[in-house]
């Protein structure tokens, strides 16, 4: 009986604390080795992409989590890196992994006609030399 | 219709004892039952709470695990299967009072039994007699529905609701004895209790004679095998499902294996004239009223109403609350009163109006349940496919656990939906008519008076069904 009581308590702890810890650990583990940037897709009249400007380092892997927090569909394109997500439905999250291989300023857009101001729904990615690379090049 | 038969077909006394199978009895007598189910749901609700907490205020509901599991899957399962078929089986495995009960017993699996009783931690007080009914649950459930526009689109609202219920259950478990919270406070307990009178399953005593001779009554006071009925019933005597939480403690404590789980015809408890009251009558009407309001607001073509419920403007939201409350607390009960008054007048019998009102209110239960099932079809068939998405990405963190995170929205059988709704409502009406005719015979002593008295109630049921059909498929 005592052993079964201990098992029940262990299962209860696992179901609660264990679940929270496991979820947080898995998410962290999944993103390991990358910069993670959460990008909110928002139509221009409500504030436009957030952040509107993304700063990255050349050669450093990045994960964009593009989250549509609105009730209209959006899309995403970063043409200079050949990245496109055809449709991000309301509430959906799309994950895009890439490693910028050149420096410069690169625009990104919404690709779904989301509102009359759709054409203004744009932001930019600024890729610079990484600090480590810049110092080793010197 | 034949006296003593449900729909003239199945004897009201027909029972099929499920616990006659040794493995079923063994399962229900194990202390892992229902603990294993509860622990699974504790895990599930931990994920739901996390999804609500991290989902925040803005995330649309269709891709949130908490909202999809609670308001699409759980609610629909509750209304379509759990309550009508399995009675209060949700209460069997509900994780919300888990912490409170653990604190009370200071045990999860085993049974504390000292000096001839189960000792409990906490003040172990009695709930006030004046609140020992469904009124508080009626008000709390109605008040909860005021925020229904938030619960289905704002994950944080679902989180706050569930967290508040858990917190309240813990506090009340430390003050009051046993499952007082579940019995008299939990917002979803009341309608489960009332609607489970229609259910196909029951826990009942097998042979009352054995109980009459047995003095120990372990099912009431507890013993080393289990706890005294946490729902404060006398398991050897109760005749309605309303307040039986199906925890199966009585099966564990009974020394003579004299408790059984039975299959039975639907609706037979609605005919049991025992402890009927205005609180339950109001519960029946409120549930019917809310089903109508929900359909009009959330599935109807009136966008303004939806905006009001979603609090697009404060004035709109207050208007929604005002109309919703007045309809459920005043207008619908008053309309029903009018028909009941007509029934009493037609019967020409000197039965108190309150008794007629209360008695006939139970006839609305099958129709109310059918309205909720029809409403549920309108939720699950168009939106069920979102469940595949949230299973793969429960916290909207970009996960894809089972490869279904980008499963497209796929409505299922929506072309058949109106016909399924019509069928459901008509079946509900049929059972309501059957119950109404029998209650008329209970209420008015003379057979002819009963027939006359039943007509206005049949009118109410028919008119309500027509109104629902117009709303659902008109």
Image (cartoon, coloured by chain):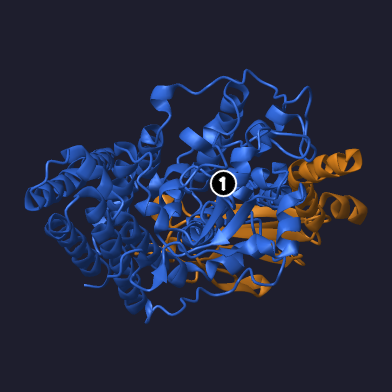
Chain colours: A orange, B blue
| Rendered location of residue B370, percent (x, y) | 35, 63
Q: Tally the marks.
A: 1
Q: Residue at x 23, y 48 (%)?
A: B443
Quadrant for residue B296, please give it: bottom left
| Rendered location of residue B462, percent (x, y) | 19, 65
Say whether residue B471 is left or right of residue B200: left
Vertical order, B286 against B405 (above or below)? above
Q: Compare residues B95 and B159 and report the one nearer the observer.
A: B95
Say whether residue B134 is left or right of residue B172: left
Quadrant for residue B3, please give it: bottom left
| Rendered location of residue B274, percent (x, y) | 38, 42
Is any part of residue B10 visible from this angle? Answer: yes
Q: Compare residues B443 and A123 and report the one nearer the observer.
A: B443
Q: Compare residues B384 and B416 and report the one nearer the observer.
A: B416
Q: Residue at x 39, y 23 (%)?
A: B130
| Rendered location of residue B292, percent (x, y) | 27, 56
Is any part of residue A122 visible from this angle? Answer: no
- Label 1 SS: helix
Vertical order, B323 against B379 (above or below)? above
Give the chain of mark 1.
B
Specify the quadrant that holds the N terminus of chain A. Answer: top right
Q: Residue at x 78, y 30 (%)?
A: B112
- Within 10 Å of disc 1 (Cα), the crowding (few <14, some 14-19, many 20+) is some
Disc 1: which residue: B208
Quadrant for residue B424, please give it: bottom left
Q: Compare residues A67 and B240 and report the one nearer the observer.
A: B240
């Amino acid at each position: 009986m005592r052993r079964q009581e201990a098992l029940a308590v262990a299962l209860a702890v696992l179901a609660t604390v264990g679940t929270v810890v496991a979820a947080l650990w898995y998410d962290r583990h999944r993103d390991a080795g990358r910069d993670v940037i959460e990008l909110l897709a928002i139509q221009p009249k409500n504030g436009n992409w957030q952040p509107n400007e993304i700063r990255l380092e050349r050669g450093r892997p990045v994960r964009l989590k593009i989250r549509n927090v609105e009730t209209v569909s959006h899309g995403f394109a970063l043409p200079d890196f050949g990245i496109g997500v055809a449709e991000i439905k309301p509430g959906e999250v799309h994950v895009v992994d890439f490693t910028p291989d050149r420096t410069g300023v690169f625009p990104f857009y919404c690709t779904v006609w989301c509102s009359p101001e759709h054409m203004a729904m744009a932001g930019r990615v600024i890729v610079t030399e990484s600090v480590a690379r810049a110092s080793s090049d010197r | 219709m034949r006296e003593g038969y449900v729909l003239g077909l199945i004897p009201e006394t027909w029972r099929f004892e499920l616990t006659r199978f040794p493995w079923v009895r063994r399962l229900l007598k194990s202390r892992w039952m229902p603990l294993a189910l509860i622990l699974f749901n504790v895990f599930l609700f931990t994920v739901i709470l996390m999804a609500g907490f991290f989902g925040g205020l803005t995330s649309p509901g269709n891709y949130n695990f908490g909202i999809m599991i609670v308001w699409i899957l759980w609610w629909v399962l509750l209304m379509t299967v759990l309550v009508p078929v399995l009675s209060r089986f949700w209460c069997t495995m509900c994780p919300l009072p888990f912490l409170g009960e653990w604190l009370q017993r200071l045990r999860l699996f085993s049974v504390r039994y000292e000096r001839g009783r189960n000792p409990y931690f906490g003040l172990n007080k009695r709930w006030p007699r004046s609140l020992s009914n469904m009124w508080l649950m009626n008000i709390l459930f109605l008040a909860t529905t005021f925020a229904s526009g938030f619960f289905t689109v704002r994950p944080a609202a679902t989180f706050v609701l569930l967290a508040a219920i858990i917190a309240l259950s813990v506090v009340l478990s430390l003050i009051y004895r046993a499952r007082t919270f579940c019995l008299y406070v939990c917002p979803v307990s009341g309608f489960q209790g009332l609607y489970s009178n229609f259910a196909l399953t029951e826990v009942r005593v097998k042979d009352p004679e054995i109980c009459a001779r047995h003095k120990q009554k372990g099912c009431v006071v507890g013993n080393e095998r289990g706890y005294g009925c946490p729902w404060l019933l006398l398991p050897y005597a109760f005749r309605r499902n309303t307040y039986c939480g199906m925890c199966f403690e009585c099966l564990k404590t009974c020394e003579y294996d004299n408790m059984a789980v039975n299959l039975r015809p639907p609706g037979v408890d609605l005919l049991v004239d025992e402890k009927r009251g205005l609180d339950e009558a109001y519960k029946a009407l409120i549930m019917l009223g809310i089903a109508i309001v929900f359909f009009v607001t959330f599935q109807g073509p009136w966008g303004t109403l939806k905006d009001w419920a979603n609090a697009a403007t404060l004035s709109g939201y207050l208007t929604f609350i005002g109309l919703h409350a007045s309809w459920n607390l005043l207008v619908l009960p008053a309309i029903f009163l009018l028909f009941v008054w007509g029934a009493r007048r037609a019967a020409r019998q000197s039965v108190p109006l309150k008794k007629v009102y209360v008695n006939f209110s139970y006839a609305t239960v099958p129709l109310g349940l059918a309205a909720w099932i029809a409403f549920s079809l309108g939720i699950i068939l168009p939106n069920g496919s979102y469940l595949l998405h949230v299973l793969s990405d429960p916290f909207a963190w970009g996960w894809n656990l089972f490869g279904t995170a980008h499963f497209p929205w796929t409505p299922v059988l929506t072309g058949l939906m109106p016909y399924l709704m019509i069928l459901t409502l008509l079946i509900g009406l049929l059972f309501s008519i059957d119950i109404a005719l029998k209650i008329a015979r209970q209420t008015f002593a003379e057979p002819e008076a009963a027939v006359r008295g039943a007509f206005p109630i049949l009118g109410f049921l028919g008119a309500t069904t027509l109104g629902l059909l117009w709303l659902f498929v008109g």
